[in-house]
Amino acid sequence: MEKFGFSLQKARVINYDSNDRSIVEYVLEREPSLKLCIECGCCSAACTTGNFTDFSLREMHILLKRGENNEVRNKIKKCMLCGKCILVCPRGVNTRNVVFLAKQAFQKYSAHAV
Ligand code: SF4
Ligand code: SF4
């Protein structure tokens, strides 16, 4: 077969029906400002952790809202809760509290699972 220097990527499908939105619902109930997020990325640009790792708060918000909790659970551990992201958010999202509540929800639900 002729090689063109590229290959087909595996299909990337987001299945909202099988995703679990329990974590984002827990967060939204306690911190409704997350609904105002327009995914602009200012928080990621200002993020202390993001300056030194591949952590992106914007990406985390997107995954959280989709219910892709396994990815969020791994990424969220990197946040140090320093609060710099709150200072730059143009929509007034309490980003630090969003991370704090998501961490709390993961603890709560994993405790129930045991
Ligand atoms: S800065 Fe605010 S509006 Fe922009 S992505 Fe972050 S949380 Fe969302
Ligand atoms: S609170 Fe977390 S997400 Fe926000 S700037 Fe600090 S390390 Fe980044």
Image: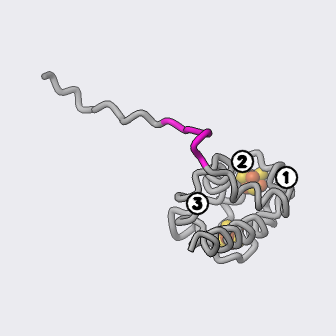
Residue ID for mark 3: 72
Q: Are marks 2 and 1 in contact (CB under 8 Å)?
A: yes
Q: Main secondary structure of the magenta part?
A: loop
Question: What amino acid does circle 2 point to?
Answer: Cys
Q: Are marks 3 and 2 in contact (CB under 8 Å)?
A: no
Q: CA distance from mark 2 to mark 1?
A: 10 Å
Q: Secondary structure at mark 2?
A: loop
Q: Residues within 10 Å of mark 3 (few under 14, many from 20)?
A: many
Question: What amino acid does circle 3 point to?
Answer: Val
Question: What amino acid does circle 1 point to?
Answer: Arg
Residue ID for mark 2: 40
Give me the residue at 75% from left, 64% from top.
98
Q: Is residue 105 magenta?
A: no
Whether disc 1's CB lies below 8 Å from ligand 1 is answered: yes
Q: Quadrant of ligand 2?
A: bottom right
Give me the residue at 72% from left, 56% from top.
24
Q: Residues within 10 Å of mark 2 (few under 14, many from 20)?
A: few
Residue ID for mark 1: 91
Segment tinted magenta in the rendering: 13-19
